[in-house]
Image (spheres, grey):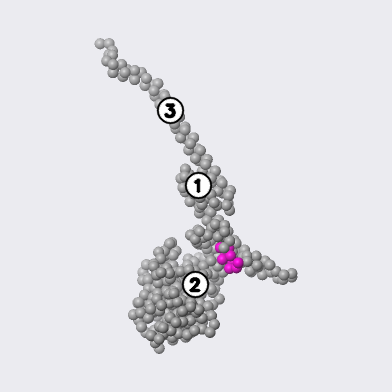
């Protein structure tokens, strides 16, 4: 029986799968089985899997009869795992050669730890390192500067408070097989891995290894990218908080405060993302609204036949998407106006400020204030010039006798002997 079961769900992963498998098979700790569940891939993934399976007997691979989806496919692997420890993996990611050895050592030395994770290094589609663009991004991939052990309740409550998953993606985690439970909750579409980590932590503590022992690939086709805009994916944070709301009190948050803080942070994140991707222009906003709502027909939930009951939940979902987008736009306007106010008022208005249209009165007021200040500057400059002129004229008259004496002395005209 192997000590470790590496669980790798695969779906159309041929682009990065070879690199992932090579990193798993090159581990310094070799007492493991590698379970690969192909979820009806339509590309060359099956050929790659069979190629590696023929070369290494530690690989156990199969193809699902129907497409299960990401978290259900993880469960297909977890259910078959025979190892004492379960090591999750993702087809896009890469293991450091010592990852399994280091994580097994932690679990062996710390019997009260149920979940161990390591720092991870984000990479792009070509394998190049991606630098963090914010403090939150840095905390997400490297939350602590040294190895750290946390009581489970502290880890869970802190994640809920921060609103970011710094516990780690599947590729950075390992847990004891005895705590696998029912596996991933497939009702979650984006935060299923985080919710599963919370459940594992019901049985023990959390240990963090500060060294980056895996690479987490971020690219357009990744699972996190494909669900990034849809509103329902973000709302899973509310679902998660409802399921584990007893931990909110540990960080002095009521459910209402948590919801308000979450929406505030979500609005700011959306504004930053829209600004970075240049999707704040009117035409782009239409596409963003469809992405948030998750449907192309925005009015579909309001269309009904005679005597048909309205779908209130679906209608509120559409209204929520519109409200969120509007809040993000207002957040953007406030940021632009704030930046404009901080600029010297002698500089011309930025193009971005001139293009704001949701609050034209605010822009007009700011423009008018700056114009008034510029006119006052002109008046002050003119007044100073006039005062200088008056000062020079007054001093000229006062010093006229002295100049006359100096002039006479220069011509040799002396006074009486």
Mark with earlier residue (2, 1): 2
The residue that mark 1 highlights is 349
Return the mark for residue 178: none
**For residue 224: magenta?**
no
| Horizontal relation, residue 313 to residue 221: left or right | right
In terms of secondary structure, what is the magenta stretch mainly?
helix
> Which portion, as a residue range, is magenta?
288-296
Q: Position of residue 338 (x, y in %)?
A: 50, 51
Question: Quarter of the image holding residue 170?
Answer: bottom left
* Inter-mark Cα distance, 2 to 1: 41 Å
Judged from the image, the secondary structure of the residue bearing numbered disc 3 is helix
Judged from the image, the secondary structure of the residue bearing numbered disc 2 is helix
Name the one closer to the observer, 324 or 416.
Answer: 324
* Nearest to viewer (mark 1 / mark 3): 1
Q: In the image, what residue occupies the spot 51% across and 75% down? A: 192
Q: Is residue 296 above or below residue 343?
A: below
The residue that mark 3 highlights is 389
Q: In the image, what residue occupies the spot 25% across and 11% down? A: 417
């Amino acid at each position: 029986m192997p000590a470790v079961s590496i669980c790798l769900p695969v779906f159309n992963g041929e682009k990065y799968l070879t690199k992932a498998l090579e990193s798993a098979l090159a581990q310094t700790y070799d007492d493991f089985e590698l379970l690969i569940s192909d979820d009806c891939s339509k590309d060359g993934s099956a050929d790659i899997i069979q190629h590696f399976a023929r070369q290494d007997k530690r690989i156990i691979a199969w193809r699902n009869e129907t497409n299960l989806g990401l978290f259900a496919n993880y469960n297909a692997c977890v259910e078959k795992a025979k190892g004492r420890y379960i090591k999750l993996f993702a087809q896009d990611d890469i293991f450091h050669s010592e990852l399994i050895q280091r994580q097994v050592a932690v679990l062996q030395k710390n019997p009260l730890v149920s979940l161990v994770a390591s720092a991870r290094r984000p990479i792009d589609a070509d394998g190049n390192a991606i630098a963090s663009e914010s403090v939150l991004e840095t905390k997400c991939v490297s939350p602590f500067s040294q190895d750290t052990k946390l009581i489970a309740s502290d880890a869970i409550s802190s994640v809920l408070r921060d609103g970011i998953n710094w516990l780690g993606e599947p590729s950075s985690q390992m847990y004891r097989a005895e705590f696998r439970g029912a596996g991933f909750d497939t009702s979650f579409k984006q935060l299923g891995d985080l919710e599963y980590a919370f459940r594992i932590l019901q049985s023990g503590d959390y240990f963090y290894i500060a060294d980056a022992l895996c690479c987490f690939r971020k690219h357009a086709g990744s699972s996190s990218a494909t669900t990034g805009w849809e509103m329902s994916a973000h709302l899973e944070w509310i679902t998660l908080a409802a399921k584990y709301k007893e931990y909110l009190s540990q960080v002095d948050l009521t459910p209402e405060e948590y919801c308000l803080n979450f929406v505030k942070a979500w609005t700011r994140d959306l504004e930053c993302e829209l600004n970075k991707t240049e999707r704040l222009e009117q035409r782009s906003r239409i596409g963003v609204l469809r992405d948030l709502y998750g449907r192309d027909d925005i009015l579909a939930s309001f269309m009904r036949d005679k005597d048909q009951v309205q779908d209130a939940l679906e209608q509120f979902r559409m209204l929520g998407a519109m409200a969120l987008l509007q809040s993000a736009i207002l957040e953007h306007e406030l940021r632009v106006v704030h930046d404009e106010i901080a600029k010297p008022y002698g500089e011309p208005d930025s193009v971005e400020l001139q293009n704001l249209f949701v609050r034209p009165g605010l822009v007009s007021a700011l423009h008018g204030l700056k114009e008034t200040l510029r006119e006052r500057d002109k008046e002050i400059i003119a007044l100073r010039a006039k005062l200088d002129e008056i000062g020079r004229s007054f001093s000229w008259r006062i010093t006229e006798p002295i100049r006359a004496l100096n002039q006479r002395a220069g011509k040799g005209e002396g006074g009486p002997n």
